Image (spheres, rainbow, N blue to C red):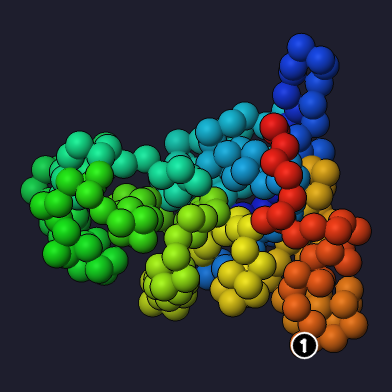
Amino acid sequence: MALITTTGLARTFRTKRGPVQAVRGIDLTVREGEILGFLGPNGAGKTTTLRMLTTLLAPTGGTATVAGHDLATDPAGVRRACGYVAQSGGVDPQITVREELVTQGRLYRLPRARAAERAEELARELDLAGLLDRPCGALSGGQRRRLDIAMALTHRPRVLFLDEPTTGLDPGSRADLWELVRGLRDEHGTTVFLTTHHLDEADALADRLVVVDGGVVVAEGTPSALKLRYAGSVDASLQDTFLAITGRTTTPADAAPVAV
């Protein structure tokens, strides 16, 4: 079953220097229970696409549905069906983990008692139980990312959007987060839409990859299929495959940032 579909999804920004086509027409399908890796260099349109699919940014062209809800005509339905973890996170460093989770529950209109129960449930599931009364500002990077994900899971979304969730984390914290993402899919059936600059992360986590460049899809398939098609061997590195697909000389993490 397709949980996310887009047809010609596009976004043009108006600037003083003229229009900038950040996303030029994305066609994709994400199946229920799939972990999709969404790859591309800086400025390729990854975050813009995620912001459109989560109703944070209005498309200027094309159509999309998320969990059966049309992006244009039922944005509230889309928001109920998805959770979103942005690159920078969104916790208040001055309040405790418990207060942050309860507040998130209340924002989703849970009764106060149920919001407190849900905070306890999420803390157990995401290894935050011993941190509930700690200020968010005192958490480590890995703990903050788990809290970001816990907040996104408050309303039990069918789709979880993760925008470069392990940026800045040490190798151990990255491995822990990988295990968490796998568990969400395997134990709860959560569909995960993941953008990342870490090609080893995409290789380890994603069931299927979609590579974008210049605001359009340039390749898609399983990691092994893409390696065979573009690098000539299923044992090739995903870095070599990415460079072959895009015709670039740098990986996403090495590429210079672009404003859009």
Counting every numbered tag in the picture gives: 1
Q: Position of residue 246 (x, y in %)?
A: 86, 58
Give the residue displayed 72% in from the left and 37% down from the top: 258
Give the residue displayed 29% in from the left and 66% down from the top: 126
SS for dot 1: loop
**Residue indicated by mark 1:** 235
Give the residue displayed 53% in from the left and 70% down from the top: 33
Please state, as top left, top right, bottom left or bottom right, where the N terminus lies in the image.
bottom right
Give the residue displayed 25% in from the left and 44% down from the top: 137
Residue 43 visible within the image: yes
Q: Position of residue 245 (x, y in %)?
A: 87, 63
The part of the image, by quadrant, that contains residue 241 is: bottom right
In the rendered image, the residue lying farthest to the top is 16
**What's under tag 1, amino acid-wise?**
Asp
**Rendered position, 174 above or below 88:** below
**Rendered position, 75 above or below 83:** above
Q: Residues within 10 Å of mark 1 (few under 14, many from 20)?
A: few
Q: Is residue 5 left or right of residue 90?
A: right
Q: Position of residue 256 (x, y in %)?
A: 73, 44
Q: Is residue 64 left or right of residue 115?
A: right
**22 or 65: nearer the eye?**
22
